[in-house]
Amino acid sequence: MDMSGLADLQGAVFARLQADAGVQALLPGAVHDALPSGALPETYAVIGPERLRIAADAGGAVARSDLTIRVHSTAAGFAQAKGAAVAIAEALAGAEIDLGGGVTAALGLRWIRAERTPDGAARRVDVTVRALVGL
């Protein structure tokens, strides 16, 4: 079982979001693979936690990755954060991305969850996509 393509999943998702005009229109230069140091814009996104499950049988193996992209915003209300989340979902849902070496991942939208921070000062919207990768 070759799992090398899975290491490239986060980078491939990041590249797709960086290249998507709809995402960049709402989050210009504000999609991050890792949280940068210094001042952050009012609304930005970070590729966040991932949950990976491998299923194997005599026919082969499939990896199922639930990857979350988190939109953070200090803008009033949810409109800005949810707009960015929808753009991210549209860029990823139904996509097939190349992980290199002939390995592709089929992406599907799992859920979007919006919440206020405990102090009410900011909003967070999580977009979770599922990637299926044949191993």
Image: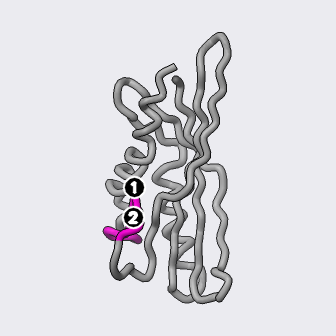
Secondary structure mainly formed by the magenta segment: loop
Q: Position of residue 115 (x, y in %)?
A: 67, 75
Residue indicated by mark 1? 17
Q: Position of residue 55 (x, y in %)?
A: 66, 26
Residue indicated by mark 2? 31
* Label 1 packing within 10 angstroms: few (<14), some (14-19), many (20+): many
Q: Indicate whether residue 32 is drawn in magenta.
A: yes
Q: Are marks 1 and 2 in contact (CB under 8 Å)?
A: yes
User: What is the distance, in whole Å, between disc 1 and disc 2 at their CAs?
Assistant: 7 Å
Give the numbered dot on residue 93: none
Q: Amino acid at mark 2?
A: Val
Q: Position of residue 133 (x, y in %)?
A: 53, 31
* Tag 2 secondary structure: strand
Judged left or right of residue 7, residue 108 is right
Q: Amino acid at mark 1?
A: Leu
Q: Earlier in the sequence, mark 1 or mark 2?
A: 1
Q: Residue at x 54, y 48 (%)?
A: 93
Magenta highlight range = 25-36
Coloring applied to the structure: one colour
Q: Residue at x 53, y 65 (%)?
A: 70
* Tag 1 secondary structure: helix
Q: Residue at x 49, y 68 (%)?
A: 84
Q: Residue at x 65, y 50 (%)?
A: 110
Q: Nearer the viewer, residue 29 or 2?
A: 2
Q: In this rendering, is residue 131 above or below 122?
A: above
Q: Indicate whether residue 3 is drawn in magenta.
A: no
Q: Position of residue 9 (x, y in %)?
A: 44, 42
Judged left or right of residue 20, residue 9 is right
Image depth: mark 1 or mark 2 in front: 2
